[in-house]
Structure formats: C-alpha cells, structure tokens
Amino acid sequence: MTGCCTLPPREAPAIPLWINGRPVLAMPTMFHEIREAATQRLIRRVPMVDQVLAATAVVNASQAQGLSPEATRSFLDSLVVALDELAAHFAGLSAVETQTHLESGRADVANAIASVQTLITQCASGSVSPNNGAGQSTLALAGPGMPLSAAIRLVLPVVTSGGAVTLVPDADAPSCALALAELCGQCGLTDGLFNVVYVEDPVALALVQESGVSQVHLFGPSAWAQRWQAAALNWAIPCELVLA
C-alpha cells in the first residue's frame, strides 16, 4: 500500500537521491509513503523533489565524461561479480518494493545479471562502441514492476555507449535504483553518468524540456507506457520504449 503525506522534514526520514556520484539528502514537505501490505508498517519515505533540484541531476549527466572502451569492460565485469555477491540483498529489495514473493525478487536479479552479461558480450563483439565524450544525456522513466532489471535495461545500454542517464524510478520501487547507482560507482562508473531522482509526473514532464536532455527512455507496463508515448508526440526529442 502506498500514498502521499505532508510532514515536517524533521519527522520524515527519507532515502536519498543520487546525483553526481554521491547521495543527496532531500527533505521536501511531500513524501511518497511505502507501507507493508499486511501490517501497514512504514517501509520507506520517498522525497518527491521539485524541478530545480531534479534538474541538477540532468546538468551533471550532460556534463559527465563517458567511459573509455577499456573502462567500460572493466566496469561491467566488476558489476556482474558485485550483483552476484549481493543477489540476496537485491532480491529482498525487489520483493518488498513490488509486494511479491522472494522468488520473484530472485528472478528479477537473475534477469538483471543476464542483461549485464549480454552487454559484456556485445562490447566484446564490437556491436557496442563506447566513447568518452560528454553531452548525450538520457532521461529514463521507470513504471511499475521489475525494479532492478528495469533500472539495468534503462541505464546500462546508455552508459556503455558513452552516454549518461538521469533515472526516475517508480515511486513504489526506489531502493533498487538507488542501490544500483551506488554499486555502479563502486564498480568504476564515472560520477554523473548515473543519477537517481524521485519526482511526480508533472515534474518529469518538465524535465523533458531541460536543455541537457537529448532523449527519453521508458520502461513499464503497456498502459503506463502508452500514456507517456502519447505525451511524447509533443516533444522535440526522441522517446523510446525499452522492452523487457
């Protein structure tokens, strides 16, 4: 069960955003609450931030230097090892945030690791050619479902091609995205290439208009994606649906 609440910042412990390679503690007055379905125990408070703060992630993404081919391969190899070592932790996060069984969380992690391994194969074959330029910034919007594998599919193909991503996860599933961003940094990803912010739909729509955004990627259920694709008809930048 989820919902929104308005509380003084001092009474609202919240998970941080991830901007330019470090956690950013944001204490707005509006939080999205995540509660355990059976007990109503409060699990997370997610700070829904305004466009000004969210746009700092876009700016950092557009200015970040992409990885070299050698650094990309090293990063992906390290990430597979780290995800495998932390599989139980990520499976638990995934199961809690999607309110499913642990087995579903394990399947989500397995799908995520398989996606990284596919990227490793593509880099080795030359079908993915990273460069170390800056300025290719993607705004990635994740709908409900598969929080870790969704983040992997939205973020890693972009950064392994030399771009940067500002990820807006579903408000009910922020922790996998945040944990992945931190883990990517530990595995060698350059600061600013992977940012995480939590915003409501009107702010996400406004972020599309930020000068640093060159494209939008979507990942989510059909009805959710169709709504965003309809809005994209009025955008001056390309919008792509990332398939599961």
Image (cartoon, rainbow, N blue to C red):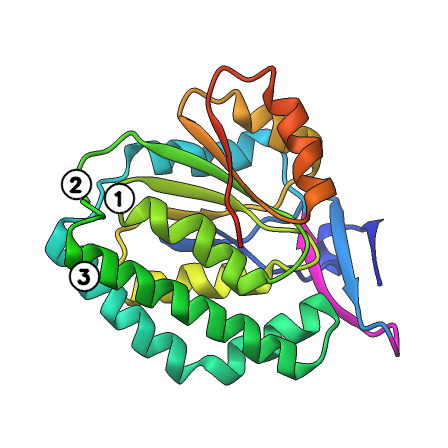
Q: Earlier in the sequence, mark 1 or mark 2?
A: 2
User: Residue 201, how many percent across, how many down?
Assistant: 69, 35
Residue 170 shows in the view = yes
Give the CA distance from mark 1 to mark 2: 7 Å
Residue 19 shows in the view = no
Identified at 46% across, 42% down, the residue is 166
User: Residue 92, how many percent across, how many down?
Assistant: 60, 79
Q: Earlier in the sequence, mark 1 or mark 3?
A: 3
Reading the image, the residue beneath label 1 is 161
In the displayed structure, 185 sits above or below 229; it is: below
- Residue placed farthest to the left in the image? 70
Magenta region includes residue 44 = yes
Left or right of 110 in this view: 104? right
Circle 1/circle 3 CB separation < 8 Å: no
| On-image quarter of the N terminus | bottom right
Residue neighbourhood size for the residue with mark 2, other residues' Cα within 10 Å, grouped as few (<14), some (14–19), many (≥20): some
- Report the disc number at residue 73: 3
What secondary structure is marked by label 3? Answer: helix
Q: Earlier in the sequence, mark 2 or mark 3?
A: 3
Circle 1/circle 2 CB separation < 8 Å: yes
Q: Main secondary structure of the magenta part?
A: strand
Give the CA distance from mark 2 to mark 3: 12 Å
Quadrant in the picture for residue 106 = bottom right
In the displayed structure, 145 sits above or below 197; it is: below
Q: Nearer the viewer, residue 160 or 194?
A: 160
User: Residue 142, how many percent across, how many down?
Assistant: 59, 48
Reading the image, the residue beneath label 2 is 131
Residue neighbourhood size for the residue with mark 3, other residues' Cα within 10 Å, grouped as few (<14), some (14–19), many (≥20): some
User: Residue 29, how many percent across, how many down?
Assistant: 74, 44
What secondary structure is marked by label 2? Answer: loop
Segment tinted magenta in the rendering: 38-47
Kindly identify the amino acid type of the residue bearing the numbered disc 1. Answer: Ser
